[in-house]
Image: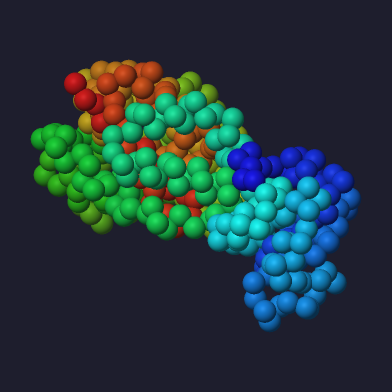
Amino acid sequence: MKFQAQNPKMFLKACQGKRLVLFGAGYAAATFINNYLPESLHVDYICDNDDRKVDTKLFGIDISKPERLKKENVDDIVVLITAVNPNELYEQVRNMGDFYCFVSKTITDEIYNSRAVYFHNNKKELEWLKAKLEDEMSLRVIEKIVENFQTGNSDFSEIITRDAYLINRLFDKEMCKDEVVIDAGAYNGDTVKKFSSYFGRALKKIYAIEPSIEMQEPLERMIANLCLCNVEILPYALSDKDAVAEFNYISNDAYKSFIQGSTDIASKIIHNAKKYQVVLKKLDDIIPVKEKITYIKMDIEGAEYSALLGARRIIQKDKPKLAICLYHNASDYTKIPRLIHDIEPGYVFYIRHHHKEHLETVIYAKYRE
């Protein structure tokens, strides 16, 4: 009954010759009917657990008690769960019969259905990743992420961990006397401040990498306010090649600014972007060969994979601690850990999630002799 690769095409195919019933008569149902219901389909009726809605109508469609589904032939009905948090409704439907069941968020939200499809089609890579994880928390995080995307659940609060990039002091034992940090996606200096405080006297230098023109002044101001003389700003975008690319600056959400084509999340807000050209550089080329890098953090809106390719020398030579965002592209959840392993097989992995929604999933890696 639970379909792991839900998408609009599969939904339309399933509905051919069947009656469509929605479960949930609230905001999600109204949004689906007004924005996503194909002209070729009509909703037979809507089920809802709220007795106040029963025997009323939503846009002319009858609202009934869920028990009505028990009387239906499961082969005649497609159930679409239209709820913000669909898990409880899914279990309720399952207890009433083996219906062909979909969740509205997984077929209407591009981010959700792309990840649901990717996870379904890449089960072997997911199993490889799970086998590489170092603790039970990491396993629980990735399993919950997969489940939420496949069932349309937007609540990730049960796996949230605080202190992004320094989680549970994961790297305390690996801290050295001369920490040299690469802060890729330095933004306005918020993580520069975090790293300077965390590493303290052990901090030798931070390379703050930020291509956004608009963020240069706030970043410089943060560094000045903290009286830091060991931070060098590098105004480049990271890649696996030297080139020029179009940068999309999102003025009302500057932290979401991105290189054109780098992320499937950011592509949804491209119409709000101010566009200009930025220089792409390989990390291996802008960091002096003699500099021993001890820590790399990357939150660069989907460019993490190509940036890691451009950091092969540093990773192989220095074997730094890594904190790399996974959530900007569906494939990053498995391709980034696989790439790190291919560059240097000695790395072990932890995964943590730092946001109540689907954002801020980070893989932490450290080298083990």
Evaluate whether residue 81 shows in this view: yes
Nearest the eye: 272 or 263: 263
Nearest the eye: 54 or 109: 54
Q: In the rendering, at what x and y percent does residue 244 appear?
A: 54, 28
Q: At 73% across and 62% down in the image, what residue appears?
A: 69
Q: At 71% across and 71% down in the image, what residue appears?
A: 65
Q: How is the image coloured?
A: rainbow
Q: Is the C terminus in the top left, top right, bottom left or bottom right quadrant? A: top left
From the viewer's perspective, is 323 left or right of 272? left
Evaluate whether residue 209 shows in this view: no
Q: How many marks?
A: 0
From the viewer's perspective, is 291 left or right of 357? left
Q: In the rendering, at what x and y percent does residue 198 appear?
A: 19, 48
Q: In the rendering, at what x and y percent does residue 274 appear?
A: 60, 48
Q: In the rendering, at what x and y percent does residue 154 appear?
A: 53, 56
From the viewer's perspective, is 49 left or right of 179? right
Q: At 31% across and 42% down in the image, what residue appears?
A: 136
Up/down of 222 relative to 30, above or below: above
Up/down of 300 relative to 41, above or below: above
Image quadrant of residue 131?
top left
From the viewer's perspective, is 276 left or right of 37? left
Nearest the eye: 334 or 225: 334
